[in-house]
Image: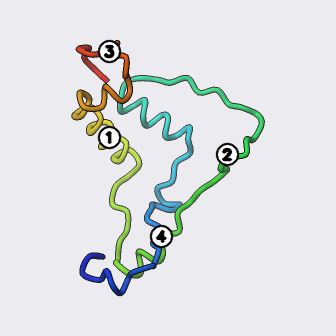
Amino acid sequence: LQIPRLRELAGRTFNVGGGREISVSLLELTELCAAATGRRVPVTPVAETRAADVPLYLTDARRVQAEFGWAPSRSPRDIVAACVGWLRANEDALLPVFDPTGARRGSAGT
């Protein structure tokens, strides 16, 4: 939708995201990842707030919705499932990035 209008849209910024309707907390996202992978990562709360912590982030996508009629079409669960599927499908190419020592080469599963 943007390509035919590149000159007209030059310099404009559009936020693209789900907003409040499909937002999830980090804890909820961790649970979705556990459900999709069958693996758990221990999460321990830290009492102090760090400078880089963002207490809440919701994308304001009204501009892209108004300009292009765009709206999110997938749920957080669907998005996580698609990401896990892509990672599994590309595991061989990604393994050197995540395991540069080669310790896991030849092992099955993600």
Q: Mark 1 points at which residue?
A: 81
Q: What distance separates the C-alpha of mark 2 from that of mark 4?
A: 22 Å
Classify 10 Å Cα crowding around label 1: few (below 14), some (14-19), many (20 and above): some
| Residue at position x 50%, y 24% in the image | 41
Q: What distance separates the C-alpha of mark 3 from that of mark 4?
A: 41 Å
- Where does the image place residue 1, in percent across and percent down from the top left? 27, 76
| Residue at position x 30%, y 31% in the image | 94
Q: What distance separates the C-alpha of mark 1 from that of mark 3?
A: 23 Å
Q: What distance separates the C-alpha of mark 3 from that of mark 2?
A: 33 Å
Q: Nearer the viewer, mark 2 or mark 4?
A: 2
- Between residue 49 and residue 18, name the one nearer to us: 49
- For the residue marked with disc 4, what is the amino acid? Ala
| Residue at position x 23%, y 27% in the image | 92
The dot on residue 61 is 4
Q: In this rendering, would 67 be left or right of 47?
A: left
Q: What distance separates the C-alpha of mark 2 from that of mark 1?
A: 26 Å
Q: Nearer the viewer, mark 3 or mark 2?
A: 3
Q: In this rendering, would 80 be left or right of 41?
A: left
Classify 10 Å Cα crowding around label 2: few (below 14), some (14-19), many (20 and above): few
Q: Nearer the viewer, mark 1 or mark 3?
A: 3
- For the residue marked with disc 3, what is the amino acid? Arg
- For the residue marked with disc 1, what is the amino acid? Ala
Disc 3 vs disc 2: Cβ atoms closer than 8 Å? no
Q: Name the residue under label 2.
A: 53
- Where does the image place residue 86, in percent across and percent down from the top left? 27, 39
Q: Name the residue under label 3.
A: 104
Q: Which of marks 3 and 2 is nearer the N terminus?
A: 2
